[in-house]
Amino acid sequence: MGPDFTLTPLLAGRTTVCCWWNPRRAPGAEGVLHDPDDPRDRFGRNRALYRLAWDHGLRGVPEPLGWDVGQRLGLFGHVEGRKLRPDEVTERRVGEAIEFVCGLNARREALGP
């Protein structure tokens, strides 16, 4: 990546999220692991969720900047913030999450089957 960049894993599991930092911009990359015994297309579903959100003006997820379908990687804009501590999970925060999910579901239903 060069001397101006550092790569930091943020989450790991079936989806691995990494962030690389540079002085000007801090995008992140998401890679979705594929289990040959699991027929679900996790990468395709994640990609569809991000596209649905951004195509309909919902900004509760990072901006998708590009996709490498063959490598099952997505490149996203950086969102400043951190994971909430348990004592920060308030009624207001839960309401924001519910509003986001309801917004996604409304757009998805409008698209039809």
Image (cartoon, rainbow, N blue to C red):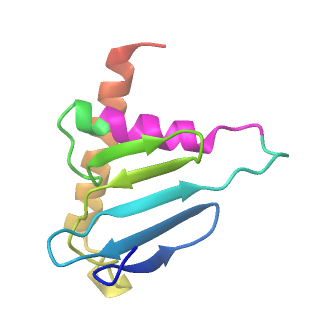
Give the magenta range. 39-52
Q: State the count of labels.
A: 0
**Is 112 drawn above or below residue 57 in the view shown?**
above
Q: Main secondary structure of the magenta part?
A: helix
> 108 or 39, which lies in front?
39
Percent coordinates x, y for residue 41 in the rendering: 64, 38
- Toward the right, the furthest residue is 37
Q: Nearer the viewer, residue 72 or 100?
A: 72
Q: Is residue 33 magenta?
A: no
Q: Residue at x 41, y 39 (%)?
A: 49
Residue 30 percent across, percent down from the top left: 47, 58
Q: Is residue 105 above or below residue 25?
A: above
Residue at the spot 29% in from the left edge and 62% down from the top edge: 94
Q: Residue 111: x percent and y percent? A: 36, 16
Q: 58 or 62: nearer the eye?
A: 62
Vertical relation: 63 (above or below) 69: below
Q: Farthest residue in the left direction? A: 24
Residue at point 19% right, 65% down?
Answer: 92
Quadrant position of residue 110: top left
59 in relation to 92, above or below: above
Q: Where residue 19 sits: x, y (%)?
A: 38, 72
User: Foreground: 63 or 59?
Assistant: 63
